Image (tube, rainbow, N blue to C red):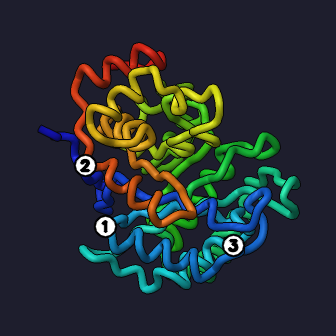
Amino acid sequence: MDTKPKTFKLGAILDVNRLGYGAMRLTGQPGNFGPYKDLEGGKALLRRAAALGVNFFDTAHAYGPGDNEALIADALYPYAGKKGPLVVATKGGVTKTAPDAIRADGRPETLRAEVEASLRLLRRDTIDLYQLHRPDTHVPLADSVGALAELQAAGKIRLIGLSNVSVDQYREARSIATIASVQNRLNLADTGSLELLRATEADGAAFIPYGPLGAHPMRQGSPLAADDGPLAAIARRLTAKPGQVALAWLLNLAPHTIVIPGTTSISHLEDNVRAADLSLSDADMASLGAIFSAPA
């Protein structure tokens, strides 16, 4: 019997389904630069996600920049889902001027300007969850997080999150503001953020693993492509796909994970959403944990 929770109360105030959608790929390529080439297809995919019960959508001002936020608004505004409001998370603190020209910019004035831009593009008065995209080595983290705390006090941001941080940076940020979430890379092939996942669990903050299937999940040599390992064996037993099992692993890893697989295919989206209904046994988790050096 599947007993893992299907929802998480983000920041103790926003109920979200733990299988969300990461919108990064609905941008121009290469480099997530410029508008998505099929705007109508992108809107159809986002609306299909909402119709399937997805109510947490992750984006960033750097995706485009701005184009991804505008697409989400075109598709989903006024953000009314089948069972309540949709939650949109965005990120700031990264400047992108070309596909290969991207840098952190955590100056308070930049964050204030990007929050205003995101509010306009998303057509919101308040951003549900605003995450520092990455720490800026040239700006004290206290200055960046302090600026977000001021924006929260002004009603521009409801909840503050972080992305691409270390455990020490997370703890420093928590001494400045209430941190509702951390978004770091984590998947079966890359378990480097497990210590941070456990730290956020202890604090009641959400952990949002990006790249939940890896950058190229079915490439030659990827653990997700192997047909002779535990992932494939579990998938066969459950009549599922390996990627669905990989997503279910993240959902089972801890009750505070919000998993945000991204795709440009509606059929793949539907497969991903079904992963929330997969039931992995303790033996399954132990088998995957032993192979991929993750805790059972």
Which residue is drawn at the image coordinates 62% and 60% (left, top)?
24
Quadrant location, the C terminus = top left
Callout 3, which amino acid?
Answer: Tyr
Q: Are marks 2 and 3 in contact (CB under 8 Å)?
A: no
Residue found at the far left of this picture: 1
Callout 2, which amino acid?
Answer: Asp
Q: Secondary structure at mark 2?
A: helix
**Does any portion of residue 290 appear in the rendered image?**
yes
Which residue is drawn at the image coordinates 31% and 18% (left, top)?
286
Earlier residue among tags 1 and 2: 1
Q: Which residue is mark 2?
A: 277
Q: Is residue 23 left or right of residue 260?
A: right
Q: Secondary structure at mark 3?
A: loop
Which residue is drawn at the image coordinates 78% and 54% (left, top)?
105
Callout 1, which amino acid?
Answer: Gly
Dot 2 alpha-carbon crowd within 10 angstroms: few under 14, some 14 to 19, many 20 or more: some
Q: CA distance from mark 2 to mark 3?
A: 30 Å
For marks 1 and 2, give the one nearer the viewer. 2
Q: Which residue is mark 3?
A: 36
Which residue is drawn at the image coordinates 52% and 35% (left, top)?
186
Decide: is 165 above or below 208. Answer: above
Q: Which residue is mark 1?
A: 53
Earlier residue among tags 3 and 1: 3
Dot 3 alpha-carbon crowd within 10 angstroms: few under 14, some 14 to 19, many 20 or more: many
Q: CA distance from mark 3 to mark 1?
A: 24 Å
Decide: is 281 above or below 89. Answer: above
Location of residue 36 by image quarter: bottom right
| Mark count | 3
Residue closest to the eye, 36 or 132: 36
Dot 1 alpha-carbon crowd within 10 angstroms: few under 14, some 14 to 19, many 20 or more: some
Location of residue 269 by image quarter: bottom left
